[in-house]
Image: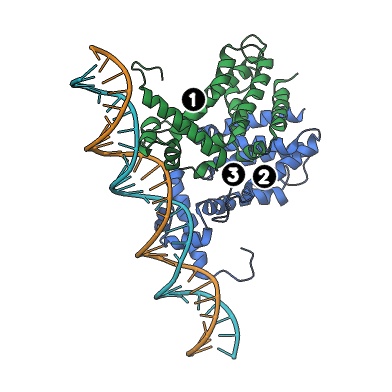
Chain colours: A green, B blue, C cyan, D orange
Amino acid sequence: MTEGRRERADATRNRRAILRATEELLAGHRPEQISMEQVAAAAGVGKGTVFHRFGSRMGLMRALMQERAFDLEEAVRSGPPPLGPGAPARERLLAFLDAVVDVVSRNKSLLAALGQAVSANPPSSDQGPREAHPVYRAWHEHLAALLAEQRPELDAELTAHILLGALHSDPILRLLEQGEGERLADALRELAVSLLGS
Amino acid sequence: MTEGRRERADATRNRRAILRATEELLAGHRPEQISMEQVAAAAGVGKGTVFHRFGSRMGLMRALMQERAFDLEEAVRSGPPPLGPGAPARERLLAFLDAVVDVVSRNKSLLAALGQAVSANPPSSDQGPREAHPVYRAWHEHLAALLAEQRPELDAELTAHILLGALHSDPILRLLEQGEGERLADALRELAVSLLGS
DNA sequence: ACCGTACCGGACCAGCGGTCCAGTTGTTCG
DNA sequence: CGAACAACTGGACCGCTGGTCCGGTACGGT
């Protein structure tokens, strides 16, 4: 990405092709049965290339997710209120929850493919520190900060994990697939409101 | 289980051996890198036997989970209050959450292995209905009923999914691994309390 | 035009989940 | 008690996967 050497033209082309192909496959097939070979074939590149660029299946999914979440991150960091800075914490939190539900529901299969939120351990290091993927990290950080600001006596970190964790659960992903996104947003908002008090 | 024909003695012996072996492996290794062959070897049976009894990796995990959750199910159905019937819904709900956290924290690796909550599709039916595993079903049902009783205006079903879903998320499982079970229980209780009102 | 090098891609590998079926063992019934 | 019948067993086997490797390719600077 932001490295010293510029990326070669064909590398860029292939990276894009791979991401696009993955999106397409993800749209049509259940994520757990998409193989790297399929991705490579669909992108019109060799398998080696896919691994060269993304390291592993998880790396691929991670990259894709990061791309998908980019807009939201921008909006939160420097967009207009209530999502961006400027609005009171309470408003920002509710707006953020809605936005996250939206992103998640537009990327259910991707989320499902990521399984949970974890682990792109360098291939063979066994007990790696298991860092969560950056998107989750960012979401959690933001949410926890807002929670702490509004209700300092809460265990903000943990509560944020609970709120976000819910979005990764399979039954909820299933609901999202059936277009119940609005319902989910409502329930979450309800929960947040009663948590934050009036 | 409760079938017409009685189970043969050697079958019982082997089923137990397989479950035990799985437990042991689960205790030592990361769940995603336990192979069925390993399980079979550790149990001292052939691979075919494992598949014969449990159908698939997921089937195995499911069976194990069911066994582990059995006590809680009993306690809820016919144990003493506040967990069992007899106490007011509010008390039962809080007690149940604590109990679930307890079960989950004593079975993190198993939960992680189950991935999310789903799918033991008969081997090759592609778009099967994807039923969740019975333990999750039972928990969800109970929780939703209690919620509905206490706060009928809520979307109890969905809220129950959110509460339970949180327990499956990877960051939370990670916390549990570090012995923060008490903290999680507190946060969840806090959440439930503000949801239920005074 | 030329050269160093980052990048490509497909042959290759070990290991996996899952299937299969011939042989074995428990159970039941005359 | 023996014989006939299932049910159970287990390891050889299969197709396929994620991941590695390295000779060849084509890009970009000069």
Could one spot residue A118 in this view of the protein?
no
Q: Amino acid at mark 1?
A: Pro
Q: Amino acid at mark 2?
A: Trp
Instruction: Check residue B102 in the rendering and tell me which mark sits there, or answer none.
Output: none
Q: Nearer the viewer, residue B148 or A176?
A: A176
Same chain assignment for discs 3 and 2 = yes
Residue assigned mark 2: B139
Same chain assignment for discs 2 and 1 = no
Q: Residue at x 55, y 24 (%)?
A: A69
Q: Nearer the viewer, residue C4 or B6?
A: C4
Q: Nearer the viewer, residue B158 or B64?
A: B158
Q: Residue at x 80, y 39 (%)?
A: B149
- Secondary structure of the residue carrying tag 2 is helix
Q: Quadrant of residue A2?
A: top left
Same chain assignment for discs 3 and 1 = no
Q: Above or below — where is A23 with respect to A71? A: below
Q: Quadrant of the N terminus of chain B?
A: bottom right
Instruction: Check residue A134 in the rendering and tell me which mark sits there, or answer none.
Output: 1
Crowd class of label 1 (few under 14; some 14 to 19; many from 20; radius 10 Å)? some
Q: Label 2 is found on which chain of the structure?
A: B
- Say whether marks 3 and 1 touch (CB < 8 Å): no
Outermost residue on the top side: it is A86
Instruction: Check residue B117 in the rendering and tell me which mark sits there, or answer none.
Output: 3
- Say whether marks 3 and 2 touch (CB < 8 Å): no
Which one is earlier in the sequence, the residue at label 3 or at label 2?
A: 3
The residues tagged by marks 3 and 1 sit, at their Cα atoms, a distance apart of: 24 Å
The residues tagged by marks 2 and 1 sit, at their Cα atoms, a distance apart of: 32 Å
Q: Label 3 is found on which chain of the structure?
A: B
Q: Above or below — where is A35 with respect to D14? A: above
